[in-house]
Image: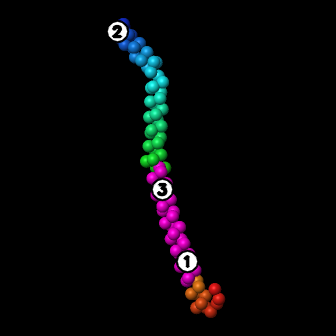
C-alpha cells in the first residue's frame, strides 16, 4: 500500500500546483506566445521571407520597366525601317 509519506508528498505537490495555478498558466501561455512569435519571425512564412519576396518583386518590376522601354525603342526603330510613322 501507499504509505502516508507518499500521500503527504502528493498532497503538498497538489497544493503547490493549486496555489500557483495562475503563475503556471501564465507561464505556459507566455511560452506558447513566444513560440508563435519565433515561428512568425523565423519560420517558413516569416517576416524575413516576406521581405525577401518584396525585394525580389521590386527588382523584377525594375527589369520589366527596363525591358518595356527597350521594346518601345526597338519598335520605333522597326517602324522607321519599314517607313511607317510610330
Q: Where does the image place residue 37, in percent across and percent down from the top left? A: 47, 42
Crowd class of label 1 (few under 14; some 14 to 19; many from 20; radius 10 Å): few
CA–CA distance between discs 2 and 3? 60 Å
Q: Which residue is mark 3?
A: 51
Q: How many marks?
A: 3
Measuring 34% from the left and 9% from the top, which residue is drawn there? Answer: 5
Q: Main secondary structure of the magenta part?
A: helix
The reply to whether discs 1 and 2 touch (Cβ–Cβ < 8 Å) is no
Crowd class of label 3 (few under 14; some 14 to 19; many from 20; radius 10 Å): few
Which mark's residue is nearer the viewer, 1 or 2? Answer: 1
Was residue 78 drawn as part of the magenta stretch in this picture?
A: no
Q: Which residue is mark 2?
A: 5
Q: Which residue is mark 1?
A: 69
Which mark sits nearer the N-terminus, 1 or 2?
A: 2
Position of 43 relative to 26 (above/below)? below
Was residue 61 drawn as part of the magenta stretch in this picture?
A: yes
User: SS at mark 2?
Assistant: helix
Q: Where does the image place residue 6, in percent across and percent down from the top left? A: 36, 11
Measuring 48% from the left and 62% from the top, which residue is drawn there? Answer: 56
Query: How is colour applied across the structure in the image?
Result: rainbow
**Magenta-drawn segment:** 46-74
Measuring 56% from the left and 87% from the top, which residue is drawn there? Answer: 77
User: SS at mark 1?
Assistant: helix
Which mark sits nearer the N-terminus, 2 or 3?
A: 2
CA–CA distance between discs 1 and 3? 27 Å
Measuring 62% from the left and 92% from the top, which residue is drawn there? Answer: 83
Q: Where does the image place residue 79, in percent across and percent down from the top left? A: 61, 88
Amino acid at each position: 500500500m501507499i504509505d502516508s509519506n507518499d500521500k503527504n508528498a502528493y498532497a503538498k505537490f497538489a497544493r503547490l500546483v493549486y496555489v500557483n495555478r495562475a503563475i503556471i498558466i501564465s507561464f505556459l501561455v507566455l511560452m506558447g506566445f513566444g513560440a508563435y512569435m519565433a515561428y512568425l519571425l523565423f519560420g517558413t512564412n516569416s517576416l524575413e521571407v516576406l521581405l525577401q519576396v518584396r525585394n525580389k518583386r521590386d527588382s523584377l518590376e525594375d527589369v520589366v520597366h527596363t525591358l518595356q522601354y527597350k521594346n518601345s525603342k526597338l519598335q520605333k526603330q522597326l517602324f522607321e525601317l519599314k517607313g511607317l510613322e510610330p
